[in-house]
Amino acid sequence: MKEVKITEQEKEKKLEKFKVKLREDGYWRIENKVELIIFSIAIGYIEGLTIQDLCRVNNISPSTLYDWKEKFIENGNEALLNGGKSSIVAKLEKENKILR
């Protein structure tokens, strides 16, 4: 893939669309983390932008983003394997059925 050079001003303008809006307390809620993970996937298709740029505008380290992304993918797989339920819920439902 050919690397495209864009100006810093163009880069900052593109990055404005990828800034996650946190509540006033600045705490990263689950929905904020999911939004950033989705942005991290999309950013790979935007010429001239990197994960580092995305993390910089959202004031987190790339390692934090990769950690959230890994946990999200692991838990997403688990949910899909158990019919959309966490393994704990699936286990409890199974035990409940046995006890009845």
Image (cartoon, rainbow, N blue to C red):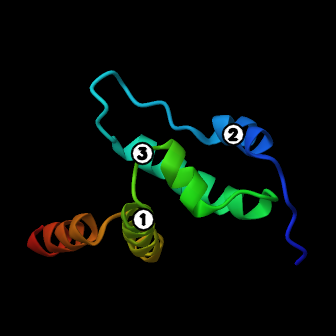
Say what amino acid the circle numbered 3 marks: Asn
Q: Distance between the residues labelled 3 and 1?
A: 20 Å
For label 2, the residue is: 12
For the point 50% across and 49% down, which residue is it? 56
- Packing grade of label 3 (10 A; few <14, some 14-19, many >=20) is few
- Which element type, helix, strand or loop, lies under badge 2? helix
Q: Are marks 2 and 1 in contact (CB under 8 Å)?
A: no
Please tell me whether residue 21 is drawn above or below residue 32 in the rendered image: above
Q: How far apart are marks 2 and 1 (CA)?
A: 27 Å
- Packing grade of label 2 (10 A; few <14, some 14-19, many >=20) is some
Image coordinates for residue 39, horizontal then vertical, percent: 61, 52
Say what amino acid the circle numbered 1 marks: Phe
Residue 17 quadrant: top right
Image coordinates for residue 50, horizontal then vertical, percent: 65, 61
Residue closer to the observer: 86 or 69 = 69
- Which element type, helix, strand or loop, lies under badge 1? helix
Farthest residue, direction top: 24
Which numbered marker is on residue 59? 3
Residue 56 placement, left or right of 95: right
For label 1, the residue is: 72
Does label 2 or label 1 sit earlier along the sequence? 2
Q: In which quarter of the image is the C terminus?
A: bottom left
Which mark lies nearer to you, 3 or 1? Answer: 3
